[in-house]
Image: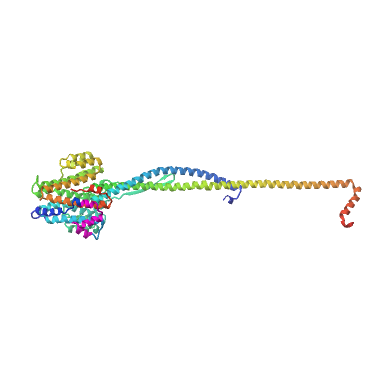
Amino acid sequence: MAKDVKPTRKNLMEIEDRIELSERGHGTLEKKRDGLIMEFMDILDKAQDVRGDLADDYEDAQKTINMARAMEGDVAVRGAAAALQEHPEITTESKNIMGVVVPQIESSRVSKSLDQRGYGIMGTSARIDEAAEAYEDLLESIILAAEVETAMKKMLREIETTKRRVNALEFKLLPDLYDSQEYIEQKLEEQEREETFRLKKIKDKKEQEERAEREAKDDVEETRAAATGDTAGTESEEMGQSTAGGVPGGD
Amino acid sequence: MSAGASNPEYVNARVRSRRASLFSDEDYRKLIRMGPSEIARFMEETEYEREINALGSRFSGVDLIEYALNRNLAKHFDDMLDWADGRLYDLIARYLRKFDVWNLKTIIRGIYTDSDAEAIQTDLIRAGDLEDRTIDRLLEVDTIEDAIEVLYGTIYYDPLSEAYEEYEETGALVPLENALDRAFFEHLLEDVTRSFGYEPSEGPEALYVEFLQAEIDFRNARNALRLARSGADLDPASYYIEGGVLFDESELSRLVGNYDELVDHIAENKRYGDRLSAALDRLRDADSLIQFEHALDAALLEYADTLSSIYPTSVSAVLSYILAKEREVENIRAIARGREVGLTESEIEEELVIL
């Protein structure tokens, strides 16, 4: 991954900016995750209570309706249920918990008084009242459970997303960015070293050339000086030398 | 119908033979150990054979038992009305009107919920005073207003017409149902003295009146306790039934506001206090009306049983049989439904009212 980046100073600066942003984001997300978990724990406790109540209410409601059906007869219970006029209504609103939108369910006309249930009071018994009451309680528990459990599920989903983001930042994005940064830094350092070395080499070479040039020049000057000082004495020698050297096959 | 001389001896003789075929304790003990299908099978070998066989192809399980029981009950009570003449007919019919009230309520609820006539018909118990023809006509109408028109000339017409206005305003069936129940209870004792020709102070007629008063008192007590417990903002006076000895209207209105005082008032009553004391204690402790209602049912049955043994050839004996038969039907249904929903044997036994 890190090898994909061009090791330029511009990229390095960009990566450094991204690292800074990611580290800041990582911190914020971590705080959000911890906050959500704390809120979730509260909701979880509530949800557990609500679940327990729901199970109890359901059992209770089943028991009372079974008793009512047994003692009053199925026909009487069905008849009383048929007389119900106003059906319960629910309205949903939303609430924001740390950026998570959770529903808030308002119910109306769930619990009814004796005269709102629709059946005549004179001809019915307390068993039907108790069954109706138990089912009203159950319905309220269901509505509450729906609210709490939906909130819990939404929170859970949000926690998971946040956790995934935190982990992605912590274990993938940031390490990659650090790698790239290191890679570019190393590359740039290497380039710098190469450059220095190259310059050094060039300098050496240049110095060598200069030295060679200077030496050559010195030689020429020396020769010239010598030539000017011993022109007669050396002419024949030179000639002989030059003949010997110049015409090797002259012997 | 009520023309001609009363014939309590004849009716009693026939009722006595019917009474002998009621289920015994031993039968109940057997039934409690059976499942719904076994109960239906058992019933097929008893007095309910015809109904079980007739309904067997349409229903099954506990529904079959319940409908068979209802049909059998209707047949028996119808027979009694056929046998009875004169004053006795009047006295029996006025008690059996409770089934008319049941049927009318069922029909009105059926119309209210747009149920089809067939479904309503299966839930009826044709044991009352209303003619089958009237009930069949009621099943054909589409609106509650038309149903009330069909009842023109019966004791239900006026109260229903009055309650209809309230029903139109509120859209709830409560006023109609209460009007029907009230019509039944108020006609229970109405003209009873005229029917006897004198104010009965002793003898079978006095006991008959006492029994009906007990029925009214128990109903008032039940409703008062339910109202007191529910805390609903209802006018207790509108649920008060006249004719009882336990409360008068102002007393009831005052007591509904104070639950403990209400219970004390019932306990202090000379006629019912001792009989209901155990149930009232339980009511104070457990705060459950069901056990109390249970005790009321048992007390009423005991009452009727005493009546039948004191004056064996009076209307009291017939009433006693009506109650015993009703109780049998309720007990069998309770056992069958109880077994269906998985109640234990001891739970069912607790709920049964057996004399």
Residue B219, can we see it? Answer: no
Which quarter shows the N terminus of chain B?
A: bottom left
Q: Would residue A20 be found to the left or right of residue B306 on screen?
A: right
Residue, x 62% and y 48% (percent of image)? Answer: A187
Residue A24, can we see it? Answer: yes
Residue, x 31% and y 49% (percent of image)? Answer: A88
Q: Where is residue B18 in the image (x, y as percent from the top left)?
A: 15, 54
Q: Where is residue A171 in the image (x, y as percent from the top left)?
A: 52, 47
> For residue B246, which quarter of the picture?
top left
- Residue B34 is a magenta residue: yes
What is the image's colouring? Answer: rainbow
Number of dots carrying numbers:
0
Q: Where is residue B7 in the image (x, y as percent from the top left)?
A: 9, 54
> For residue A44, which quarter of the picture?
top left
Q: Would residue A204 be found to the left or right of residue A101 on screen?
A: right
> For residue B120, which quarter of the picture?
bottom left
Q: In terms of depth relative to the viewer, which is nearer, A161 or A105?
A: A161
Q: Position of residue B277 (x, y in %)?
A: 19, 41
Chief SS of the magenta region: helix
- Residue A173 is a magenta residue: no
Magenta residues (range): B27-55
Q: In terms of depth relative to the viewer, which is nearer, B66 or B123?
A: B66
Q: Would residue B209 be found to the left or right of residue A203 on screen?
A: left
